[in-house]
Image (cartoon, grey):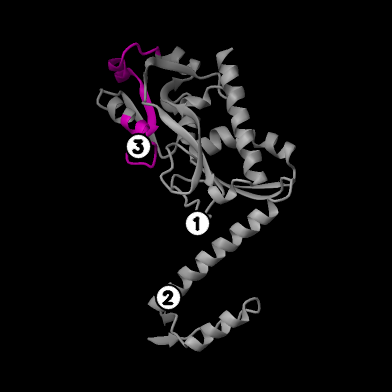
Amino acid sequence: MRVTRFTCRNPLFPAKSERLRKLNATLFHRHARGLILTEQGELLFDATKAMNHRLEAAVARIRDSKEEVFGELRVTTTTAFGSMWLAPRLPKLYEAYPDLRIDLMLEERVLDLPMREADVAIRMKEPSQADLIRKRLMDVHMRLYATPSYLEANGIPETLDDLSKFRLICQNTSAAQVSAGAALVRELLTYDVGSLLTVNNYFGVLQSVLNDLGIGVLPDYITQDFPQLTRVLPDIESKDIPVYLAYPEELRASKRIEAFRDFVTSELAAQRRSMAS
């Protein structure tokens, strides 16, 4: 195995670059599959990664000291909420702030906001990370929905025992999802379900329901945008799922964060008024 040594010359930080060069440390091992970091290399990588995050945070604060809302805003949320609720509403945000650039990261993994993996998050549970400002936006419930055409062709279930005559569409309980949703599905599967279709995200469940494949387990926030769906077995729903907006304390004065927070809050308030009327 051949050892590769690394020389760092950084024109922005010449003193630090020279100090690294004088260490004469082995930072990489070369082997048939490429380069891997040594223990010393891991230490240097972790230190420079942390320094880069602090630099990004400083740049963000400097930019946000102005009154304009512009630049990149990295938003993370779940695949379901991002694709079925947030993305369809983003044109209004862009119309209000045309210089804003949104990087929308849809995944179930909780990104590290203090380490600047994202600027702001909308999650289906209260964040546990420290140094975060958090705002509870609403509660979500998983419920059963189907299209009128599917129910016209197959009938309407009156009890959970009637599921033996229908196809249930849901996420597999082993797929990444909110725990309350998985608990509801496990309960439903204790009954003699006639047919089953599992999908690994709620967007897939929604598309299957819209195409008359069966009765789907879906979050209730979709009802405003898909009024054609009919709720089935209205007494059946999951436990409350709290939805939180969170962002790092160091971005408290960010104009981009403020604009996004106010936008989401306003859209949710409009949805509640629409559903109440």
- Structural distance between the alpha carbons of marks 2 and 1: 22 Å
Residue 49 appears left or right of 192: right
10 Å crowding of disc 1: few (<14), some (14-19), many (20+): some
Q: Amino acid at mark 3?
A: Asn
Q: Is residue 34 visible?
A: no
What secondary structure is marked by label 3? loop
Residue 73 appears left or right of 51: right
Asked if marks 1 and 3 touch (Cβ < 8 Å), the reply is no
10 Å crowding of disc 2: few (<14), some (14-19), many (20+): some
Q: Is residue 49 above or below residue 81?
A: below
Residue that appears at 54% across and 38% down: 82
What secondary structure is marked by label 2? strand
Tell us which disc is closer to us: 2 or 1.
Answer: 1
* Residue 266: x %, y % from top left: 63, 29
* Residue 130: x %, y % from top left: 44, 49
Span of residues in magenta: 155-183
- Structural distance between the alpha carbons of marks 3 and 2: 38 Å
The front one of 271 and 34 is: 271
Q: Is residue 199 above or below residue 270?
A: below
Q: Amino acid at mark 1?
A: Met
The front one of 145 and 166 is: 145
Earlier in the chain: of badge 1 and badge 3, it is 1
**Residue assigned mark 1:** 115
**Residue assigned mark 3:** 172
Q: Is residue 268 visible?
A: yes
- Structural distance between the alpha carbons of marks 1 and 3: 32 Å
Tell us which disc is closer to us: 1 or 3.
Answer: 1
**Residue assigned mark 2:** 37
Q: Is residue 188 above or below residue 83?
A: above
